[in-house]
Amino acid sequence: MSRTPADSTRRTEGLEGRPRAVLLGVQLPEVSDAELASSLDELARLATTLGLEPIARVTQRRDRLSAAAVVGEGKLKELARWTGGRGAVPTPGPPGTHGGKKRLEREDGDDERAEDADDGLPQDERATVVLVDHELSPRQARNLERAVGAEVVDRSSLILRIFQRHARTREAKLQIEIARLSYDAPRLRESPGGRDRQRGGIGGKGAGESALELDRRRIRDRIAELRKELAGISAEDAVRRARRRERGDTVALVGYTNAGKSSWFRRLTASDGYVADELFATLDTTVRRLQPEPKPPVLVSDTVGFIKKLPHDLVASFRSTLEEAREASLLLQVVDASDAAWREQLDVTREVLEEIGLALRPLVGEGAPEGLRRDEGERPCLLVLNKADLLDDATRAAVREERPEAVLLSARDDADLGALRERIAGFFEADLEEAELFVPWARHALVARLHEEARVLEEVHGEDGTTVRVRATRPVLGRVRGELDAG
């Protein structure tokens, strides 16, 4: 058993105090070697984000996950050498015995029974966690834990734990607790002493509920309570989004986690938003004005990042947060062009947005085609291939040829910042309409609003009021005209 160079490097980077983890992946028939490696690389980054130190990877090719313990007998023994486990799932033996060992599914070339695994590593160097790059059934997780003698965490649970750690606002915490409870409910197990039923019915008649049934009912009640509280917060957010939608000048940054969305958000808005080289650094939607501020002003929102195999309950819980993308006039899809899996990440982003009923339509050219921005089922999207500074000339040329509609930029480059800002401003400029409005003195507050929400080209004061020539969005002009007509 040997460590890879990457493992040795991590040990020299001062991670000795972190809990050690072994990564476990099964290569199914439709998964290529490159896809498997990319997925495990991402799992390792998730582990590091949670504060674990990946020390090894164990993989196996299979037609499907083993229903018993994910992998076959030989791989269980290999895992057990890293964790100090037995390498087999113990099963109860006949009464009066000390139990036995279960013969698990055989792999190609495996014809030995699972015996006690060789400890392999000294006690203080063993892994205490096994991270599985799949979602496990309760039975699979339980059997795997018994075989390896370590905590088993599947991909969904790992993502939920990271979200729970990074949540800051009340809304994000509610969303994550709902997802966590939805994940945990089917995984509850009856405790050995939990088969007794609570007394049921008036006067104690009836079988009542088992402890397991009671726990599940409590979880359902808690989820209902959390959803009610979340609905109140979401209603307030919906009002704010509706006000922004009336102005029609919002941009949402969307994309894979750690693609650089928050870096672009901070630079485009000249703000001090949190930026870190870790997965899911941003969970809470933040909205700021584009800087330097154009007229009319443009709002930019930073949204939660996506990841493949994102737990469905988590997508459902964050639906209100993702509404920022639904309400935006323009989407900036940020992709890490230096990541070998960037094409797959593009697909993941599209699939998650489709789950909330939103399709992406590539923005070609500088302007905003009439009517496109108002299509409820589609949003114009500018593809931003980020981290261009990490690419060599040949790769840059190949990427540009493959995605000619995209812009290849780096958030660290001031010239690229200026180019992207002008592209955003140009999109909204193309949708502005010029109009001349007469505002009587009694309604002069509308002039101040036009200075805030539109670009005032000319202002002429007369005896009865002010004539204002402006360039503004159609919603703004419609609202002001309506108020003037109302008198």
Image (tube, grey):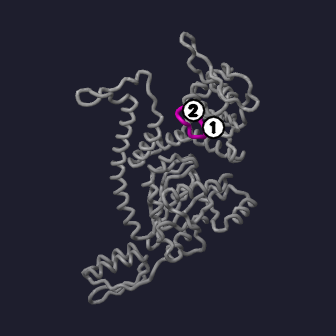
CB within 8 Å, label 1 to label 2 = yes
Q: Is residue 232 left or right of residue 249?
A: left
Q: Check disc 2 and report the residue beneath it.
A: 140
Q: CA distance from mark 1 to mark 2?
A: 9 Å
Residue 14 shows in the view: no
What residue is pinned by disc 1? Answer: 65
Residue flagged by tag 1: what amino acid is it?
A: Leu
Please check the rendered image and state whether residue 34 is part of the magenta-colored stretch, yes or no.
no
Number of marks present in the image shown: 2
Residue 89 to residue 220: above or below? above
**The C terminus, quarter of image:** bottom left
Q: Earlier in the sequence, mark 1 or mark 2?
A: 1
Disc 1 residue crowd, few under 14, some 14–19, many 20+, Cα 10 Å: some
Q: Which mark is residue 100?
A: none
Direction bottom: furthest residue:
463
Q: Position of residue 443 (x, y in %)?
A: 27, 79
Query: Does the rendering let one see residue 320?
Result: yes
Question: Magenta segment range?
Answer: 129-140
Picture coordinates of residue 377, whole percent (x, y): 49, 66
